[in-house]
Image (cartoon, helix red, strand yellow):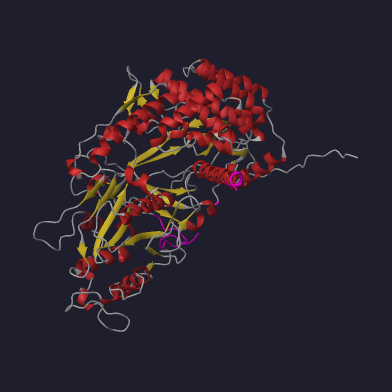
Amino acid sequence: MDQLTTSELNRLITEETRQADDIDDVGHLLPFIFKSFNADLLPTAASLRGSNKKPLYDSTKKTWPLACSEKGQAIEKMFPSFLNAITHALAESFPAQPLPPQWYGSNSTTPIGDSLIQRKPDLCLSDDVTLQWNNILVVAEMTASTFSLSMPAVKTLDTKAYLVFREQPWRRFVLFLSFTHEHRELCVHLYDHSGGIVTPVIDIHEQPDAFKYIMASIVFGSRNCIGFDPTISINLKMTQLLSETFWARNIKKAVARENKILQSCEQASTNPQKQFHSLPEHLPSPLPPTEQPSKEKSTLPNPIPTNSKQTPPLVNSSDIIGKITVNKNEYELLKVLFSHQGLVGRRTVTGGKDVVLNEVKMLEALKGVPGVPRLVEYWLVEMAPDQVDDTQLYRQKIYSSTAGMYRTHVRLVLKPRARPLHEFRSRKELVKAIRDIVLVQKCAVEKHNILHRDCSLNNSMIEDTDDGSRGALIDWEFAARITSDNLYPAGGTGTIPFMSIDVIQAMSTLEYQQSQTMAEERKKATDSSTRQEVPKLRHTYHNDLESVFYVFAWICIMFKGPCGQERHLEDVNSDFKRADIWLPQQWHGPPENASAIAASKYFFFFKRTLCIAKQFDPYFKDLVPLAEEWAEIIKQKDMKMEFDDISSLLDKHLARLPDNETSLDFQTSSNKLAKRMGEPEKDVVTPKRNRVV
């Protein structure tokens, strides 16, 4: 994992420089992110006193005695006490503030995380003594070695930044620390979705006041000083660990189980939540930097129940996990659907305001198309009045290798409220929703000359309507007007498990070309790297249609029933031979494995379509003929199927499916979903069983 995150950040880490002959210069970043903190209130380092009233800093010896480890004493055990002593001494300058967060070294030998990605941070700043990646505020790594970007301590910070972003997607950036060169040299590391920044080295003993300023800003400054968004408030007690999207997590567990089984076979033949960053439970309203939100609260609409005669219920307050500001309006957050996987937006399309607001333009062009969300409002999020949140502002200098990689913070509010495709209520609703998504693509292409380019499980939804429901396609960020050469920037090619074979193959070629360039430039200074133009890939509506098949197959393998019932592949009995590897497992992987993923998909269509019956969950057995016919069309058309080919096939199988499902699992799951949405539950009828004598 460290290798993957380091590769993702290659040529995107900016090392700040200090002004000549100014030893107290801390660079550009820290004054910028700490500007809301009033450093004038701080006492001098020499005046700080510990609980025993003795000075914490020895001005004569120019040292912090508590930071100097004694022989045989673990630095990870001693250093938290030193940092907390500084915190307690500084707290006297902030009597009105609540109890500050504390530094902990308890997980320097005990990993934090799930069974897939576990890391042992040396030091953590948190409000909670039980550390999880969703309640960690800051991480610090300790090493006796001299600082360099390639050192292991920095590489492991890269991965820990990914883990914090994964569990706290509401953060604008993550702020970490490294104490190097016998733990006396401090660097501050900022990670955002454009890469990273490292501040100039500060000797904590020779520059005690600069060190004190940094630690005070982190602990006593507002939480936006360490990356939290002041326009969002979240109550972590109402959320859960995201731990990646379900499909990625489940696939990795299946891989781990397969490896364990294969290993045991080889051996046999030769003889494996708490309170969120001091937010009170009543969830104060987030405030935009420009002005107060309007008194008239604006909330997203409740879902329309299937029975249109019922009055739409109000959202239960117990379902609200947070609040978010857009322009002058405040919205209630009900659920985190998915979290971005990775640190940097791969090959992000950047440019002027027209490019930044591409999704807004696409939604306006598609206004009125059934299954395309309606834009309510959008906001270029502001950090301060008239200052849009742009990652370029954090950089001291835009180097040649980082030019064009900055990102602008845009927030969209859409209607209607929808549910993920995997929360379908019946097999018929699933197939109908998929058919509707095909029709959305068709209408966008044929009537509006627009290509979506990113059809995936996360972007496939179900809208509840007055007369039932329909499929919807969201996330039009990378949609584009169709060009004569069908070439588009590579930033919006889709999500790997759901990409078409042709697009994955093109991406594989691109990855290889870039890897050759990176191999030559990996150790070069950022400002000497060659600026990379955003490459283009060929993409047509045939590719988007192929993606819909992968979404359908994925659901039928990864779920075991309606209303989002997850299927845990690691618990399914199967002969884990090479030919029996789960299809989603073969289709999932990092961009570096794009060539192998494309080959596995091609092999499936031309050699392995019969495995569908074996891999689909028993609940979906009636949909196996649909999947097999669909795969055959893709094969016969050589991936060049038409919209009518697929919509006609789906219509044919829709007619064969019953309108109502009466299974016990369906009724129970439907009632769970109805309860969550505030709809009345129906009686669960247990099917009668014939007595066998």
Q: Which is more toward the observer, 311 or 567? A: 567
The answer to whether residue 301 is magenta is no
Tell me: residue 455, above or below residue 315: above
Q: Is residue 276 magenta?
A: yes
Residue located at (50% from left, 39% from top)? 417
**Residue at the location (60% across, 42% down)?**
567
- Compare residues 273 and 155 and report the one nearer the observer: 155
* Residue 398 visible in the current orientation: no
Where does the image place residue 32, in percent across and percent down from the top left?
A: 22, 55
Where does the image place residue 678, in percent across and percent down from the top left?
60, 46
Quick one: 36 or 54, which is closer to the camera? Answer: 54
The location of residue 522, given as percent across then percent down, is 25, 42
Q: Main secondary structure of the magenta part?
A: loop
Q: Given the current orientation, which residue lies at the most extreme right position?
A: 693
User: What residue range appears in magenta?
Assistant: 267-285
Figure quadrant of the C terminus: top right
When the figure is inspected, residue 538 is found, relative to residue 66, above or below; the finding is above
**Can you see residue 268?**
yes
